[in-house]
Image (cartoon, grey):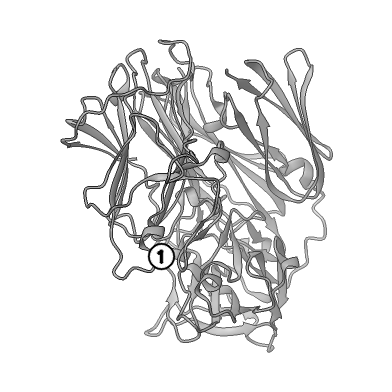
Amino acid sequence: MKKLFTLLLVSCLISQAFPQVGTPGLKGNGQQFYLETFGWGNPADAKGWTAPAGFYMSDPKDIGYNWHWWPKDSLVTSRLTKEPAMRSTTADNGSLCLFLDLYNDGKDPRTDLDNSITFPTIDCSSKSSVIVSYETCFMCYNDNTYWQMLLEVSTDNWVHSAQYDVSFGVKHKGRPNNTTPGRPAIFEANISDVAAGSPNVQFRFTWRNTSLYFWQIDDFKLKEAWNNDLQMRFAQMEWNDGDDITVASPMFLIPKKQLTAGGAFTNFKAAAINFGEYDQESAFLNVDITKNGNSVFHAEGAKKDIATLIVDTTLLTESYAPVEFGHYKVSYEYKQKEAEQTPENNKKEVWFNVNDSIFSNADNTSEEAFNWGIEAYGTDGEPMSAHIVGTTYKIYADCEASSISAFIAGGKADGMIDFGMKLFYVPTEGDDLTPVDLLATSTITYDSTMIGKWITFGLDKDGESEFLKAGDKVYACVEYTNQHTDIISKRYQSLLIGADYSFRLLDPVGVARANDYAAWTTGGYPAGRNLMVRLNINDHSNLIDGVDLAKTNTTVGQNFPNPFSRTTDIAYELTGNENVSLTVTDLTGRVVREIKEGMQPAGKHMVRIDASGLDAGIYMYTLKAGGFTETKRMSVSK
């Protein structure tokens, strides 16, 4: 988040805010004191909605279009946008929206916007701290070096204002936190230095200097900070392959024989911000690696005091070199002297596995349905031929390529899309660095039974090209042809490949090409994606490693938000098909909720708890999945 200060001359807007009933002046309790859910639908209004008193919209370019209410419905235009309804917490009553593509649909040239919506005045005079948060979905055109997405805050009727960049750092056609279409990201910032103690706080959302696509906002909240609240901003580690020139991201699956050339996990790095009211004393980063449930590595950073709103970044340069088959978990956690009141947001876990035959940068769970068609949709009226998406692998020891697997995440399954796999050798020296075709597979017609599955194709070997050498660099790719010629089918309904965001990528691994004659795209739109395409080699030395993955890797997360007054989400991850149930009890052990999820497949899942009928207080929730059981605590605030 970057914060700038500027001078603005805007008329004063003072009207009734919409406060939630709470105890004023409480300190460090996380009390929510303002909520706007944008339930503005009004059939009696000619435009279908009415903004409450005190909201004001600005259109300095006088384009005649601005922020508006949007019902729980998809966002669709004739050419460029096909977006599902936003699944926010209060999605049923609609959201705040600026559907720019609807305004510019079919226009040539398109019009850039400069539009704002200002909130009524909110009294924060009794608040010693102020946290702002909201749920959002958006997609923008061009990089954010051109356009601005701002949350502006003023306490003196816009004579001065603080500006917060709320673009999440996304680039061309990116989404906040790499969320999937319709799934909101949560923006949260501590604005105590601007708003706390002020009786006249005004907020304004501004979007300018772009002509496409949309921005949706829902569930705008203000709350007080907790006393002790460190929040982890990111966690990462590096794979040291002996190359001092480049930085390599870790892999989720790496064949054991590829480790014979050395290599180690190193440069464990994480950052945390002090979101709490109090300075956090003796805070430090703790990193643990366990193998099949047993500790094999531990490192700690230096202890330090972190003042409120200060970000601490710690780098641990120790290394860990795995050498045996196994299932490994890397745990990052910021700890401090005082008891953490929100421990769920200052830790992160990632996994990697040493196996016999699979190279995979990505894990088994798709967090995005990657759509190359939205960028490379070609010419109107013509099909898409020989489009390629894939991922990069370095070969550390001689091996024999056997097959390629890809996780299919969707697409228009009407018999008009065919696909197969290709393996490319990538020269790293010389004048011509163009990737060279090594091996291909047969092709098949895509159908809906493939969605949510790994599909594997055996490579058509020639007795030579399948033998890869140490030091080689290859692209493992999916090649598809989409016979549709309409723009929507090509942009939004081509073959979709899963993408995973468990690891923080340190180098671009995703690659793409529009057709046989187009240049390879190794940066920009595909490069930051961890695409779920695997290279499989001919090695079956790991017959069994004696590990029950269901017991070592099944996890249940802390509910979010916590505390909550309406709904909260609980994430869990399975490593195999399991019968899942969730039970909520009060502190006396009385069951107050029981949710039977039934048989669920391997992967990441989410269950939502509704606070209706629950009194304020502490509750325990227990997830059961096969032989796995874990209990965590959550709080309901009313």
From the top left corner, tell me how far across and down residue 65 is, in percent. Answer: 32, 52
Decide: is 559 above or below 185. Answer: above
Decide: is 212 above or below 148. Answer: below
Decide: is 372 above or below 269. Answer: below
From the top left corner, tell me how far across and down residue 604 is, in percent. Answer: 67, 47
From the top left corner, tell me how far across and down residue 607 is, in percent. Answer: 69, 38
Q: Residues within 10 Å of mark 1 (few under 14, many from 20)?
A: some
The answer, for residue 621, to whether it is visible in the render is yes
Q: As rendered, which of 396 and 153 lies closer to the eye?
A: 153
Q: Quick one: which residue is furthest to the bottom in this view?
A: 462
Q: How many marks?
A: 1
The answer, for residue 333, to whether it is visible in the render is no
From the top left corner, tell me how far across and down residue 185 is, in percent. Answer: 49, 43
- Say which residue label 1 marks: 524
Residue drawn at the location 43% of the way across and 20% of the way down: 19
Q: As rendered, which of 154 and 319 lies closer to the eye?
A: 154
Q: As rendered, which of 601 and 274 lies closer to the eye?
A: 601
Amino acid type at image mark 1:
Gly
The image quadrant where one finds the C terminus is: top right
Residue drawn at the location 58% of the way across and 25% of the way down: 564
Give the side of residue 613 with respect to residue 44, left or right: right
Callout 1 secondary element:
helix
Give the side of residue 410 with respect to residue 181, left or right: right
Residue drawn at the location 34% of the way across and 33% of the way down: 55
The image quadrant where one finds the N terminus is: top left
